[in-house]
Image (spheres, helix red, strand yellow):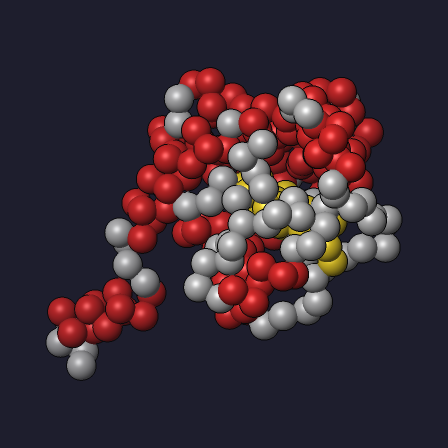
Amino acid sequence: RDAKKILLEPGRGKKSLLDSYTRFIKSLPDGESLLQKLTLSADESLSAGDSLSEKSSIPAAGDSSYSSSFSGLLTQLDFMNQEDWDKMMKTCSVLFIRGEESLSRACLSGIPFVWHAYPQSEEYQIVKVNALLQRIKEYFTKEDFTIIKNLWLDFNKPESELNQDEFFEHTHAFLENTTRMQKGFSSFSDDLRKNGDLASNLMTFLKKNAIL
């Protein structure tokens, strides 16, 4: 309901997420009629920056050219440079991102996100995911943190361990409450930004120690 534009980077669970998102829409009041206004075009060949969105997409912030890109329930995006990718990402309501580079941008965006870490041997990515979950825990109520944790762990566990019904329930809970959880993600982003950027901090260090 509140998640009108969703960025989904390629990765494990894409089809399951699409199915869950469709079921989520059906569960809303007048969901069946809403689905009739949306076009569904998805298969496993889709890649690089898939995006789920409503036809009446949110106007893009800053660059209106992006608003016309989200014309159906699923739109495959062309390759774009990092600057354009960042602009597009900031127009979204929810992010499903993969890897560390996208994670850093998601953390700074203040937008509710789910992180799919790159799979590692012995499922070590779960250790990294749990570490970040503990880092953001203080910014959310117990209820909201449980919602976030459930879906993040679903996205990062082996496919053989994924319960599709639970995955739908966890996806539904996350999408249903993104507006409420927005404050927590924004506060986390604000605190990160207080650290400053690497270039400025390095120059300050050099000047403070009379290296320059």
Residue 118 shows in the view = no
- Quick check: 66 left or right of 19? left
**Figure check: 77 above or below 141:** below
Residue 171's quadrant in the figure? Answer: top right
- Screen quadrant of the C terminus: bottom left
Q: Residue furthest bottom?
A: 212
Residue 96: image x %, image y %?
61, 44
Residue placed most toward the observer, 74 or 136: 74
Q: Closer to the camera, 71 or 160?
A: 71
Identify which residue is drawn at 67% across, 35% down: 155
User: How many labels, in total?
Assistant: 0
Give the position of the N terminus as an image quadrant. Answer: top right
- Report the residue at 80% width, 55% height from top: 46
Residue at screen point 37% across, 42% down = 186
The percent position of residue 184, horizontal first and vertical second, equals 38, 34
Q: Is residue 200 visible?
A: yes
| Residue at 61% across, 47% down | 56
Q: Is residue 95 left or right of residue 200?
A: right
* Horizontal and vertical percent position of residue 6: 61, 45
Q: Quadrant of residue 207?
A: bottom left
Query: Residue 41 at what x, y percent from top left?
Result: 82, 49
Q: Is residue 155 above or below residue 80?
A: above
